Image (spheres, coloured by chain):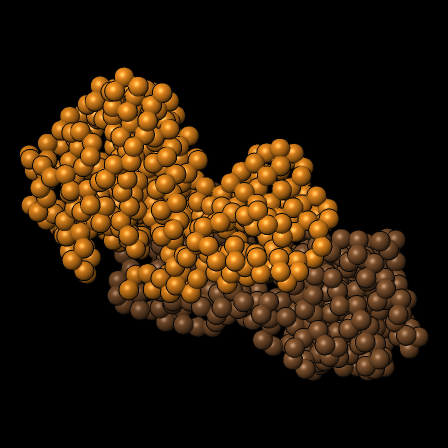
Chain colours: A orange, B brown
Amino acid sequence: MFQIFPIKGGLDTVEGFFCDGVHAGLRDTEQPDVAFIRSDTLCDIEALFTTNRFQAAPIKHYQRYPDGFQSNFVLINAKNANAMTGKRGIDDIDTILSQLPEAANAHNPVMSSTGVIGYPLPVEKIVSAFKKFDFGAKNSERAAEAIMTTDSFKKELAFEVVLEEGESFRIAAICKGAGMINPAMATMLCFIVTDADIPKARMKPLLKKSVEQSFNRISVDGDTSTNDTVMLLANRQSGVWDEEAFSEALDMLTHRLALMILRDGEGANKVVAFEVKNAKNEEEAKRAAKALSNSLLVKTALFGEDPNWGRIASTIGASEITCDEAKLVIKYDDLIVYSSEFPVLDEAREKAAAEIMKQPQFTISCDIGEGDATYTAYGCDLSYDYVKINADYRT
Amino acid sequence: MFQIFPIKGGLDTVEGFFCDGVHAGLRDTEQPDVAFIRSDTLCDIEALFTTNRFQAAPIKHYQRYPDGFQSNFVLINAKNANAMTGKRGIDDIDTILSQLPEAANAHNPVMSSTGVIGYPLPVEKIVSAFKKFDFGAKNSERAAEAIMTTDSFKKELAFEVVLEEGESFRIAAICKGAGMINPAMATMLCFIVTDADIPKARMKPLLKKSVEQSFNRISVDGDTSTNDTVMLLANRQSGVWDEEAFSEALDMLTHRLALMILRDGEGANKVVAFEVKNAKNEEEAKRAAKALSNSLLVKTALFGEDPNWGRIASTIGASEITCDEAKLVIKYDDLIVYSSEFPVLDEAREKAAAEIMKQPQFTISCDIGEGDATYTAYGCDLSYDYVKINADYRT
């Protein structure tokens, strides 16, 4: 038995972790653009990275450390992805990290970047942040603001997990991500810290499972970036461990952050769960659900709040899964909008469907009737604002 | 030796073919919405249909005819796809076609539909067109107008092919397609007629090859519809045949129509050829080229005329092909925008790149440097208007 309590704040709530965000001139505005996260003791660290073949320099830099290395310091910048920058990109990270002051007490520091591809890092600007940082601060809010790109709100969450015996540990995260979110964990950075006494060997499996059920199920525009990173740092300072409780807290954390990212999808107004049920097998359920969450025609119909289930059916039919229009049943929340046994959508039911679509969050479910596999993907609508934001991202 | 001359007009230019389009009340405007194409003698007929699992009723109806059947009559309607309409959808086609008057002289008539999914055909309205049709007309323009959906202009083309001996035959087509065009031949109808004396056995292979190099290479939004059809009718009235000449004319015809569809992509302002060169193999070249033509981030960058080659690189990297940033070279027309040996895009070259992007048609080429396979896909930009058109398609 255990209980999970949401607590106010972010990374600052976890024992032994410190963070701050400052403005170092990477942005035109006064918003912070460089952040650090550090622990006063060494941490075990695990990270999952983008599947993009052109992984950014900070990812390559991270991977130069030996397996199982420990670290206590993460430096993060916005506005420049340090991707497609070749050997220089990695050298720049070394140059920057070597200038961290003693006050940072950094051991095996790692870096993470997000922003535009193909330009060298502004090394001096980033280094100038080191004089502005308060390395003893617990300023999660500023760190969360510093890593934002097209995000319209900062994303941080923290939970306290209390075991039956009254012992407790905490887990918290900041993340960023708005556009370019795809079912393969895209254009997002997420930094999770915990004081749970998690065995090093359990970190990767639990993180993988959690990401598969959260960040890998959301899609804003189906693109996968060069920089996506989910990182977990554990300083074990609580001395408390319960795998079931930790895993549930981690899953809640990543699932909620994933939906936050989706809700903040560029120009998005609503979050839709695409549930594909009774598909022939898991692979087909997943393929169909992801096809729905990525379809431009479905996304624009959501924006238009048009209960045009034909686009749902057409997308299912185009996803190369086993299916039959005589068996298919499509529902918006609990309303059947298509079934071969049901009459054509009449005016009353069409009106009801349109009402369902006006909600900020609802479910479109497709019962395929060919097996018992289920998969849920999450998507958002595509609005004028998505086009606007992405047509002039760099300006 | 042969020559191919474009000639003014459409289906009307080919011996023995007749066509017309009339308004039968399916549209709210006075634009024609029902069309026929007929030959005064029997034709060999071949068709390629959508790969969508939910093929529309007219496709199922066509497939009930025995292999190698001959026909001389095609009826086409807009505004209603007759898809996801079950057995009723096929029965409705029988009901409609059985009421064709004697003047139609229809033998094994077939039907084709485009429009909204999930509503029964307005049978009486469509039948009412039969009284308005002039079955002896050669009114290709009206037929081309009748099959339009979100198209902003009608699409028809005709060629005369003159052999060395002075003998000649003709080939012509009308087609429609604007949104929902995907590399798997989507939301488009195309009707090709010829009086060439083509052997029945050559029709399918030549049509397949031609479609693979044209309609299958264009993408407006990556969706594949329930109704896509490319149909070829040959009445052989010229008595003239030359396979090489016919094949070249057919390829020119389909390639030009495909680019017309792309130019008319919903809200699209420019057509871009995505050429992937020196990929490891053809499959990888195709995958990368299609990923580029379908990427929302690439499409919005095209609309914004932002020479953000990072999105091109990121999409290549995410397409799961063999690639290495040290070997990759990206060009806009003849301008190198990325190469690991080249310096960062400076202001002058960035300006030049932006100028290239202002053109209504240009090429983005990616040299992968891993082999010798090449594939070119064609795409268009994504604008506010795409969202507008698709958010309220049905209204």
- Quadrant for the C terminus of chain A, please: bottom left
Task: Judge left or right: residue A282 versus residue B363.
Answer: right
Residue B50, image quadrant? bottom right
* Residue at the limit of the structure toward the front, as seen here: A348
Q: Note whether residue B18 is visible.
A: no
Residue A246 placed where, x, y %? Answer: 33, 25
Residue at left offset 33%, top offset 48%? A177
Which image quarter: residue A229?
top left
Q: Which residue is at 34% across, 45% downward?
A: A188
> Is residue B363 shown left or right of residue A112?
right
Q: Position of residue B272 (x, y in %)?
A: 49, 65
Q: Nearer the viewer, residue B150 or B206?
A: B150
Q: Is residue A11 above or below residue B346?
A: above
Residue A242 percent coordinates (x, y): 32, 20
- Is the residue A328 above or below the residue B112 in the image? above
Is B130 or B239 nearer to us in this picture?
Answer: B130
Q: Name the foreground residue: A314 vs A73.
A: A314
Residue situated furthest right in the rendering = B102
In the picture provided, is B110 more to the left or to the right than B338? Answer: right
Q: How many marks?
A: 0
Determine the image quadrant of residue A52.
top left
